[in-house]
Image (cartoon, helix red, strand yellow):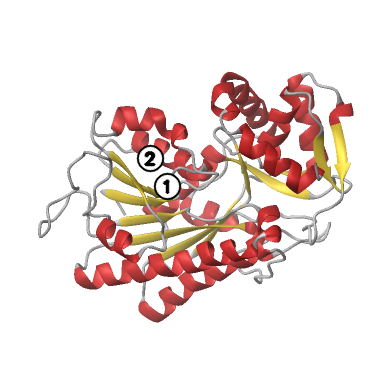
Amino acid sequence: MNPATILVTGGAGFIGSNFIRTSLLRDPTVRIVNLDSLTYAGNLESLTDVAGEHGVRGDNRYRFVRGDIRDAETLACLLAGRLRSEAGSPPLAPAGTRSEWLPDVVVHFAAESHVDRSIVGPTAFAETNVGGTLALLEACRAELLRAPRPFRFVHVSTDEVYGSLGPTDPPFTERSPIAPNSPYSASKAGSDLMVRAYVETHGFSAIITRCSNNYGPFQFPEKLIPLMITRALRDEPLPVYGDGLNVRDWIHVQDHVDALWTVLTRGTPGEVYNIGGEAETTNIIIVRELLRLLGKAESLIKYVTDRPGHDRRYAMDIAKIAATLGWTPQRDLKTGLAETVEWYLSNRTWWERVLSEAYRAAHALYLNG
């Protein structure tokens, strides 16, 4: 698959914004339409450089559209290459003409993605992650009936749909059973199964990817690594759930978006691909390493009551994507963490702009303050 125009949903989020930036650099001809509703974790400042270089005042290969993936009219217009992308700009194409913005690929990131928020308010997760994915699938199917063309849909999911592993269990493979343990992971599992149903029922050309924990630049400060970095820089307590020995497999976001491009261009429709960093590490080791890199004392660590239903361990077997598509992660965890700390030190203005919301959420979710 050699994409001409990619519709990215949730492109103002952490992974989506990194995917957009990298894809425009990787392919000098590709166009990208970014559809995002700009909820609390969506931040267009993460794409300021992209808009400047590739927007209407640059080489005109990038457009942003604010909208909800549950809005059928917005989806229909975008998938047909018709919608105003920015205030005052012309339509992407006049009605009745074939637009150069007609998508041949959809990469679906848009989702509510924070486990703790899903425990407090699960309804939004079901509505966005399951309902939104269904609306997008229906809109794509209708568009392809209207205007058949080569097309690919990449659904970006999570290792959390597999549930939890014991300390000696083998890593998850693509054949591992789906056994989600939180409202968030249940909603993602539901969206995965909806995509699978469209593949099996309608012959829809979709691929599902399931990735381990991401980290890197532009990550919203409620997630573990940026939360710990930004709180430590302010000498605030670092909340660590339970005993801190929950294990996660960590992958740098750049490795993840490289894997997604590989799947998009060379993957087989109907398949599922696990994407992992092969870097299983306990949460407390991550926190201590971040404190070491920042020159901060471990006395900042504050153990807090464990999250309900907290999965003990995730681990990903990436043999399939390595063997069939030739992708493996390129960044080791130690180097990646050091680079991430340096990014947050060098981009304090970016993360300080979101601190008010992020820290209110952190206190409510972790510290009961």
Secondary structure of the residue carrying numbered label 1: helix
Q: Is residue 269 left or right of residue 192?
A: left
The image shows residue 282, relative to residue 275, as above or below, that is: above
Query: For residue 27, which quarter of the picture?
Result: top left
Secondary structure of the residue carrying numbered label 2: helix
**The N terminus, quarter of image:** bottom left
| Spot occupied by residue 70 in the image (x, y as percentages of width and height) | 42, 63
**The C terminus, quarter of image:** top right
Tell me the amino acid under the disc marked 1: Trp
Q: Residue at x 36, y 33 (%)?
A: 25
Q: Give the mark nearest the N terminus, 2 or 1.
A: 2
**Residue annotated with mark 1:** 261
Between residues 194 and 3, which one lies in front from this camera angle? 194
Q: Is residue 252 left or right of residue 196?
A: right
| Spot occupied by residue 201 in the image (x, y as percentages of width and height) | 40, 81
Asked whether the viewer can see residue 199, the reply is: yes
Q: Is residue 215 left or right of residue 150?
A: right
Q: Which residue is drawn at 12% across and 52% down?
A: 94
Q: Circles 2 and 1: CB distance less than 8 Å?
A: yes
Number of numbered callouts drawn: 2
The image shows residue 113, relative to residue 214, as above or below, that is: below
**Residue annotated with mark 2:** 23
The image shows residue 334, relative to residue 191, as above or below, that is: above
Asked whether the viewer can see residue 3, the reply is: no
Q: Which residue is drawn at 64% across and 64% down?
A: 122
